[in-house]
Amino acid sequence: MKNKLTVVFLLIISISLAQKSPVDYVNPFIGTSNFGTTNPGPIAVRGMANVSPFNVAGPQNLPLEKDSRWLSTPYVHENTFLTGFSHVNLSGVGCPELGVILAMPTTGAIVTDHLEYGSTYSNEISQVGYYSNILDKYDIKAEATATTRVGVSKYSFPAGESNILLNLGLGLTNEEGASIRVVSATEIEGVRSVGSFCYYKPEEAYPVYFVARFSRPADEFGVWKKPATYKGVESEWMGYNGKTRLMKGFTKEVVGDSIGAYMRYNFESPTEVEMKIGISYVSLDNARENLEKETSGRTFNEILLDARKEWNQYLSKIEVEGGSEEDKTIFYTALYHTLIHPNTLNDFNGDYPKMKTRETLNTKGTRYTVFSLWDTYRNLHQLMGLVYPKQQSDMVKSMLQIYDESGWLPKWELNATETTTMVGDPAGIIIADSYLKGIRDFDVEKAYKAMLKSAGQLEDNPLRPGLQDYIEKGYLTTKTTNSGSVSTTQEYNIADYAIAQLARELGKKDDYKRFSKRAISYRKLFDKEFNLLRPRNDDGSWLTPYNPESGANFEKNLGFIEGNAWQYTFMVPHDIKGLMKLMGGPKPFAQRLQDVFDKGQFDMANEPDIAYPYLFNYVKGQEYRTQKMVSGLLSKHFKNSPDGIPGNDDTGTMSAWAVFSMMGIYPVNPAEPMYALTKPKFDKITIHLDGEYYRDKALVIKSGKSFKGEAIQKISIDGKPLKGYFICHQDLVSTSEIIID
């Protein structure tokens, strides 16, 4: 009997495994350690609302505590002290922002200090669209899911006095200012000021509105406010100086910094309460409408089911077969992370805030936000263009809306503010890449005009500071900028290359010639003494003394932003043959490229050199190095564990690298519709192409029968041998089957 039961049990397990969907492989805990800055809280595909456990406040969480170091995430996996659940957050970013509208269920008396009401937690579960834990201090089970604009929570309280706190005083940054009002025994509304991304531009702080609705009317409700401590002479008369004011039954708006509201219950038996918080960047009315349109009449479980269904629909655009269960988890989690940002800015009715002035505008499509373009122009948008071209089209249209509203294409746009974080002119690269790949349902003439503006306006140019030196000399000098003269020149080169390619496609021959010439001006910064790039001074002389290793590990230096000469010299993907010639030919090029890895200079955790492993494909006979490098980097840096991303995910850029690499294709050169090929991680990969943009219904990539993990012997495209290790985008999307053997 025991043996029969064992057989039945194993059969059930095997059937269960066979029926696993892509959504079942995702592990949202990946990236929540090692400064990956993802969080395990539920979010819809490109959602506005994200219910994240908030465990980065309080000395119990040292050293990974938000006020004790630069920390840009509401959640760190190794931390143990929870102070609530924030409802608007960023994923995989390097600067702190958002992490506000914190809800916390408690029991007993009302306590408003998060350091006192915070709790350790256990039994953590995170799946696509779902998160839960047990708050140890209160024996409360907290669960969460989300729609696009609404965070949905369910709290299972024990019998007795119970509370739900909404704390507007706590957030990821030190930005202040909020208002809150109890509307009724089942509803609270409010607004919280956020902004100052990277602690830049505090004058551009902006409001996020919310409406919270509860499934059970509170037995008691109220608000609290903790004013600043006054130190003047009159403080002697203020017995309430700096003390928290608890106002029971108060129904008017309360304004301040450290404020909040509560719903209080007295349960005779264990009871569940559902809370839905609608979010808007436009108004309270829109937050309320978002809540009603997306969740009215729907239970927590129904919303959860729909969230997982939507995620599975998107994740299933790529199906993988063969390979290990671990590899599938790594792959689908990476794909999941690429579908978080850019995310939705507009409300259900199409309203969204205009750049700068924040007056209300309206869109018929999706207005996207969180454009971390210095990162994502390199691979994430290429992945979107291939697998989710409708989303990519809407992202391009969003960039053009930003141009209409602000006069410039975005650089690092966040919730209708331009943070101007990082360097370069990346939006045009993405636009050109999209158009060249056949995504053309946008105003390309407007886009081209916007690209020319950023490439030509010498004064007050937020995208290309130092442009005059760049045009006149061909490069930025150590006088033009005190950081990144070489790497910023390279970024401008890549942007000019993109303009040239789009100009050629649009028949603008003179512009094609002009920008093609500008795109290779980095060559003036190549120093044969080091066989690397080197900064030049204003008079044209080399920067001396010079250490090409200076700049690693984010050390500030004159030549390079977030990197050094080793990590940037090969970042000329549009001119690999030109760089090869500068270095003396294919063999010296390959050896110098290998030196980057052998000397420990390659940095998988940062963008400038992430395409380096694929550059061996440009040297005949050295392609095996690409295959070896990519395979080794995947194994070393991408894991099914909280530290399974090599540092900051950069709004999905590192994850996009893993997705492409595990499929065996990679877009080395932004704005050139071409992919480098390597060994795929799976036996079979099926990409279901969007028939609105691409002709074939599916693209299949297979590992041949004789493929045993050694170097690739041959590649065939629909049965015909492929010469070399690259395939153009048009051939890729017109192909039914690629076999890599």
Image (spheres, rainbow, N blue to C red):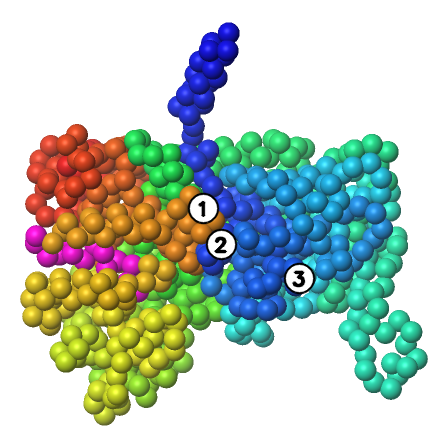
Q: Tell me the SS state at disc 2.
A: loop
Q: CA distance from mark 1 to mark 2?
A: 9 Å
Q: CA distance from mark 3 to mark 1?
A: 25 Å
Pointer 3: what residue? 58
Residue at position x 11%, y 72% in the image: 582
Quick one: which residue is furthest to the bottom in this view? 539
Pointer 1: what residue? 641
- In the displayed structure, would residue 68 be above or below residue 253? below
Residue at position x 69%, y 45% in the image: 135
Task: Examine the rendering and report whether any part of residue 393 can be seen.
Answer: no
Marks 2 and 3: in contact by CB < 8 Å? no
The rendered magenta stretch, by its main secondary structure, is classed as helix
Q: Tell me the SS state at disc 3.
A: loop
Q: Tell me the SS state at disc 1.
A: loop
**Residue closest to the eye, 451 or 597:** 597
- Which label sits on residue 455? none
Relative image position of residue 678 (x, y in whole percent): 20, 46
**Residue closest to the eye, 570 or 298:** 570
Identify residue type, mark 1.
Ser
Instruction: Specify which label sits upstream in the sequence, 3 or 1.
Output: 3
What stretch of residues is rendered in magenta?
607-621
Marks 2 and 1: in contact by CB < 8 Å? yes
Identify residue type, mark 3.
Gly
Q: Quadrant of residue 706?
A: top left
**Residue closest to the eye, 193 or 510:** 193
Relative image position of residue 725 (x, y in whole percent): 14, 48
Relative image position of residue 572 (x, y in whole percent): 21, 66
Residue at position x 57%, y 39% in the image: 125
Identify residue type, mark 2.
Ser
Pointer 2: what residue? 33
